Amino acid sequence: MMFDFFFFFQLAALLICLIFYKKLIYPYKYFAPFLFLIALFELGTLLDWFNINHSNTGILNLFSTVEFIFYSLIIYVLIKNVFHKAIFFYTLIFTLVFTLSYLIFLKDFNTFNTYTFSLQAFVIITSCCMYFFYKIQDARNEILIIKEPTFWLYTGLLFYYLGGFLFFASYSHMVYKGGENFLILYKIVTNVSNIILYSCLIKLFLCFRQAKI
């Protein structure tokens, strides 16, 4: 089984976050406990702490939803437009209700719920695309975009969820069959998308090295 190399990027993101914690502004300070939780989860996954019937998919179903809630709340805080904020809020509520209902009535909890993940990914991807669309429209912004923490957050989330969304959209039928080739491909997609996400988060935290954002 291919090793999860992105674990080192998770630890690096946590370390950089803690180093610049005092300079971080709301809502980025919440990344410190969240990244610590992620590091514990990944460590537990590597050490087989969560294995039930030789599978950790059950805890992955829950954790992917927790991860979605966290990033959604961060996006909700960052949205400035009141109308868009309301739309995103009700979309989030609908997604969580659907996810909870699916988890409750899911017959095999140890099978990854690709439908709920795909819906969650679609919500995040759409939000990221909206951010970039309005960023392109806003020519009056005097701050270089690569110096903005929000740019790196949305960039990381876009690649992270887009990778998972496209993968499960293409190979959802193979989730139930498994197979060595499927697992190898899954590991590759997971490593690449996570490395991009946590690299962007590292850059996000580094944006606070100098002047106040």
Image (cartoon, rainbow, N blue to C red):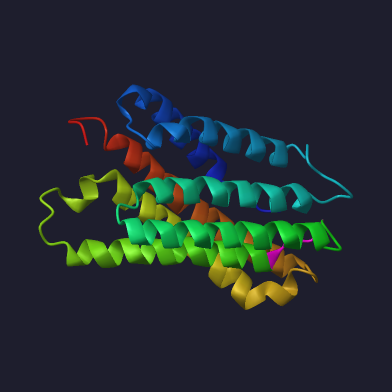
Q: Is residue 134 above or below residue 208?
A: below
The residue stretch that appears in magenta: 110-114
Q: Name the side, left or right, on which 195 lies relative to 209.
A: right
Residue at x 47% of width, y 60% of height: 124
Residue at x 47% of width, y 30% of height: 32
Task: Name the quadrant of the C terminus.
Answer: top left
Report if residue 163 is visible in the image: no
Q: Is residue 47 above or below residue 132?
A: above
Q: Name the side, left or right, on which 73 lies relative to 205.
A: right
Q: Main secondary structure of the magenta part?
A: loop
Q: Is residue 51 above or below residue 2?
A: above
Residue at x 47% of width, y 47% of height: 73
Q: Nearer the viewer, residue 175 or 128?
A: 128
Q: Position of residue 130 (x, y in %)?
A: 34, 65
Q: Position of residue 138 (x, y in %)?
A: 17, 62
Whether residue 87 is in magenta: the answer is no
Residue at x 78% of width, y 40% of height: 48
Whether residue 111 is in magenta: the answer is yes
Report if residue 108 is visible in the image: yes
